[in-house]
Image (spheres, rainbow, N blue to C red):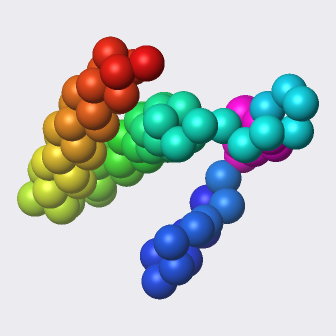
Amino acid sequence: MSHDHHSTHHEHPHHHDHSTRAGGREPAADQKLAMILEHWIKHNESHVSAYREWAQKAAELSLHDAGARIDEAADLTLAANRKFEEALRKVRQRG
């Protein structure tokens, strides 16, 4: 999976609908924020899986320090997800 991290958008398989709501209306801003947060959480989870896999491969290549750093990056990504999940709860509490 190739990423262009110089832009704010990159391609991934998506399993959600970007179309407007029934009646042709855009989702309310808070609903859109909830959808974005949900997307970021799932997106990060997919990255964590890849990070863990490559950390293991690095260890198998006797690149233990590199593997440890990749594992740390996975942990940081999960920490970011916890913040996104907290934000999502706040958005949902308002609705």
The segment highlighted magenta reads 13-20
Secondary structure of the magenta portion, mostly?
Answer: loop
Q: Relative to 25, is 8 above or below?
A: below
Residue 38 position, x and y percent, is: 48, 32
Closer to the camera in the image, 56 or 31 = 31
Q: Against 15, is 19 above or below?
A: below
What residue lies at 18% left-to-right and 61% top-to-bottom?
66
Residue 88 visible from this viewpoint: yes
Question: On the picture, is 60 further left or further right than 46?
Answer: left
Q: Is residue 87 above or below residue 29?
A: above
> Whole-percent x and y of residue 92?
39, 20
| Visible residue check, residue 46 | no
Q: Residue at x 17, y 46 (%)?
A: 76
Instruction: Please state the horizontal and vertical placement of residue 28, each as a whole percent of the image.
Output: 59, 37
| Residue at 51% from the left image edge and 72% from the top image edge | 8
Q: Residue at x 58, y 68 (%)?
A: 9
Q: Nearer the viewer, residue 78 or 33?
A: 33
Quadrant of the rendering where the N terminus is positioned: bottom right
Q: Quadrant of residue 10?
A: bottom right
Q: Nearer the viewer, residue 79 or 90?
A: 90
Q: Report which quarter residue 19 is drawn in.
A: top right
